[in-house]
Amino acid sequence: MHGHDHRYGSTGSGTVLLDLGADTGALIVHTGRRLHGREIEISRADQPGGPRTHSAVRERIVRDGVFHSAVYPDLPAGRYTVWWDERTPAGAVSVTGGVVAEFVWPSSAPPGVS
C-alpha cells in the first residue's frame, strides 16, 4: 500500500467515469471498511520493478448498499500485481479491454508479512 492515508467522503453512483474500450479496461479492488482512506498500488506484472499507480479506498454508496473499494478507471489490458505493501504482492488480476475486472483484498496478510 502507498504510504498516504486520506479521509475522503462517500461517493455515490455515477461519480467514477470508467474509460473502457478495445484495449482499455478498469479494475475495482474491494477491500472492506478497515482500509478506508488507504492507497493501494498496482503495477503491470510483465514489468517487474516498473512504475506503479495507486488509488485511494473510498466508501461507495450504490443501489445495492455500501462498500469500500479502490477504482482504477482506465488501464491498458494485461496482467497486474496488486501490492499489499511496498515489497509484498497481495495477488494478481487480469484486466481485459472493455471489461471491469474485480479483485477482493485478502482478509489476512500474505505469508512472511508481520
Image: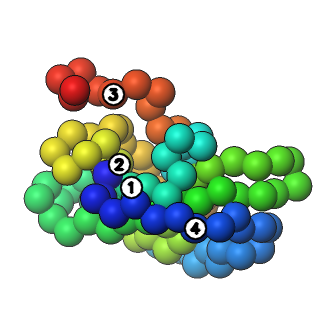
The tag on residue 40 is 1
Give the alpha-carbon distance from disc 4 to disc 1, as whole Å.
14 Å
C-beta proximity under 8 Å, tags 2 and 4? no
Alpha-carbon span between mark 4 and mark 3: 25 Å
Between residue 64 and residue 11, name the one nearer to us.
11
Q: Which numbered dot is residue 109?
A: 3
Image quarter where the C terminus lies is: top left
Q: Residue at x 79, y 67 (%)?
A: 13
Mark 1: which secondary structure?
strand
Q: Position of residue 77 (x, y in %)?
A: 42, 64
Tell me residue 92's x, y (percent).
36, 42
Q: Secondary structure at mark 2?
A: strand
User: Could you tell me how far apart the alpha carbons at marks 1 and 2 are, in whole angstroms?
Assistant: 7 Å
Tag 2 or tag 1, which sits nearer the N-term?
A: 1
Residue farthest along the top direction in this orientation: 111
Q: Name the spot of residue 111 as percent of width and height, x first.
A: 24, 21
Query: How many labels, in total?
Result: 4
